[in-house]
């Protein structure tokens, strides 16, 4: 009735706005109802789709890009601090002359250092995602774990994978990114032989691009490991092939750095 009165110019726009304030809660219900109708229409196109409360999943996947960039920056700083001295310490203290006397001592040292580094990478990955999981579960809930990811409107063109697998992909890609930063930092530590030098080089490679992006050069983040942290958005934009290609590159870098450490730790 108010809309009809406004169209027939029986009331002014100011009067219309004042009268509509009494129906604000009804308008919110109407918006939600329209979204439900839209999802019901989508169910006809994709029968396997389910009705999903999307807010928690979108928060977890950081679809609106508010958390992945800071996570990239902090993870790169932690990797530089934690791993820059792991191989440089033997060069600085002279222990390399003792460890390097036997091939078994060299390989065993590298192997255990890498295992320890990988455990720390897993800890960094879990710590970066755990607060987000907690907030998503506490404030929104994460139901329908087996629903296809395209049940969420923003992922309508994504492949048919369940939501729990998308969460696992997010964790694995982030672990791969952190492991890559760790392996490169370890190789720099062995090559430079100085803790602060390796830390500076690692920060320059991995922390500078996200820092420039935070400072205003928004496209600089794509020159870092940020795409692997933001992999869920790539799946939502149907660019998952780019993410898989980046994962292969990162795994290759990890392998090359590991071989370098086994070969040159002497």
Image (spheres, rainbow, N blue to C red):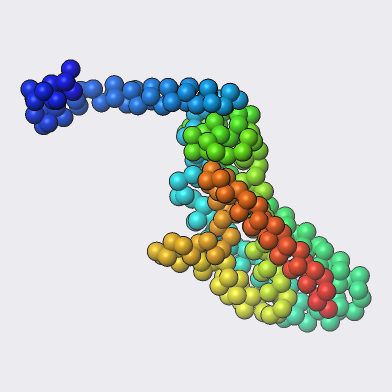
Q: Image quarter for residue 207?
A: bottom right
How far across and how far down the image is residue 44, in percent? 53, 22
Give the vertical position of 142 relative to 112 (above or below): above
Quarter of the image with the N terminus is top left
Quarter of the image with the C terminus is bottom right
Most distant residue in the top direction: 1
Of residues 215 and 80, the one nearer the viewer is 215
Of residues 33 and 56, the one nearer the viewer is 33
Residue at 50% of width from left, 62% of height from top? 221
Q: In the shown orientation, is residue 71 left or right of residue 93?
A: left
Q: Image quarter for residue 115?
A: bottom right
Residue 89 appears anywhere in the view: no
Q: In the shown orientation, is residue 132 left or right of residue 21?
A: right
Of residues 74 and 250, the one nearer the viewer is 250
Q: Image quarter for residue 2?
A: top left
Residue at 64% of width from left, 57% of height from top? 246
Residue 100 appears anywhere in the view: yes
How far across and how far down the image is residue 258, in percent? 77, 66
Residue at 80% of width from left, 77% of height from top? 264
């Amino acid at each position: 009735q108010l809309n009809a009165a406004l169209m027939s110019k029986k009331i002014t726009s100011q009067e219309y706005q004042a009268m509509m304030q009494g129906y604000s809660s009804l308008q919110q219900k109407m918006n939600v109802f329209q979204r439900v109708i839209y999802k019901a229409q989508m169910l006809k196109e994709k029968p396997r789709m389910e009705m999903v409360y999307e807010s928690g999943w979108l928060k977890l996947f950081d679809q609106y890009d508010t958390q992945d960039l800071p996570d990239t920056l902090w993870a790169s700083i932690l990797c530089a601090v934690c791993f820059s001295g792991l191989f440089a310490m033997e060069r600085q203290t002279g222990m390399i002359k003792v460890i390097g006397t036997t091939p078994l001592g060299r390989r065993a040292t590298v192997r255990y250092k890498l295992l320890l580094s990988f455990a720390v990478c897993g800890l960094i990955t879990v710590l970066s995602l755990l607060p987000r999981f907690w907030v998503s579960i506490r404030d929104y809930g994460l139901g329908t774990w087996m629903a296809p990811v395209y049940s969420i409107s923003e992922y309508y063109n994504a492949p048919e994978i369940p939501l729990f697998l998308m969460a696992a992909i997010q964790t694995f890609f982030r672990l791969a990114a952190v492991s890559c930063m760790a392996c490169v930092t370890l190789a720099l530590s062995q090559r430079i032989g100085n803790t602060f030098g390796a830390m500076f080089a690692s920060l320059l490679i991995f922390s500078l691009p996200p820092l420039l992006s935070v400072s205003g050069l928004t496209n600089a983040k794509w020159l870092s490991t940020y795409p692997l942290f933001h992999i869920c958005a790539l799946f939502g934009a149907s660019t998952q092939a780019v993410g898989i290609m980046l994962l292969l590159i990162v795994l290759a870098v990890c392998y090359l750095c590991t071989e370098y450490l086994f070969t040159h730790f002497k």
